[in-house]
Amino acid sequence: MNLLFINGPNLNLLGKRESDIYGIESLDQIINWVTERIKTNENEINWFQSNSEGKIIDKLHWALSNDVDGIIINPGAYTHYSIAIRDAISSIKIPTIEVHLSDIENRENFRKISVIKDVCISQISGLGKIGYLKAAQALIKEI
Ligand code: DQA
């Protein structure tokens, strides 16, 4: 099982940005916590973060030619308006789960809209780092 985690803009600032919303842990700490819980000899796990829409799209295309079985994506603010990321997810046809650390349904109105939701298997929101773990476990079970 080859899993790819993608994190979008500003998630490199976890631990520093709005800790009341996103928690005090850095992205590296979250990566280590999640990876420790799912790593086996059979699972290949890759993490990618970018602040650029195009780089996220390139990584989704990369997944297609690199035998990625499942994708966990937190597109950050791109969630709410990037039709280009939506089209990339839809084009590659690799099972994908959308994750958000915060509960996007219970924040500003503009965060309630996800343009990628219906090209993903499911959306997990508001569980903090546990969301990434649950998404990975669901993909491992499903694939
Ligand atoms: C986020 C929620 C988005 O609305 C926001 O723009 C982010 C992080 C989350 O993980 O809760 O950058 O995706």
Image: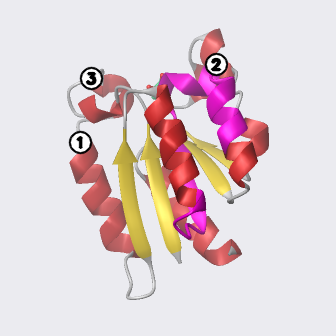
Does the magenta segment cover residue 53? Answer: no
Q: Position of residue 60 (x, y in %)?
A: 55, 48
Farthest residue to the top: give it.
109
Q: Is residue 112 above or below residue 42?
A: above
Does the magenta segment cover residue 75? Answer: yes
* Label 1 – label 3 distance at C-alpha: 10 Å
Question: Marks 1 and 2: CB-CB under 8 Å?
Answer: no
Residue 81: mark: 2
Q: Which residues are magenta?
A: 64-88
Q: Position of residue 34 (x, y in %)?
A: 36, 62
Farthest residue to the front: give it.
65
Q: What amino acid does circle 2 point to?
A: Tyr
**Residue 58 left/right relative to 16:** right
* Label 2 – label 3 distance at C-alpha: 21 Å
Q: Is residue 99 above or below residue 107?
A: below
Q: Quadrant of the C terminus?
A: bottom right
Whichever of callouts 2 and 3 sits on the residue coming sooner in the sequence is 3
Q: What amino acid does circle 3 point to?
A: Arg
Q: Position of residue 15 (x, y in %)?
A: 22, 33
The residue pinned by badge 3 equals 17
Residue at position x 58%, y 11% in the image: 108
The residue pinned by badge 1 equals 25
The image shows a total of numbered marks equal to 3
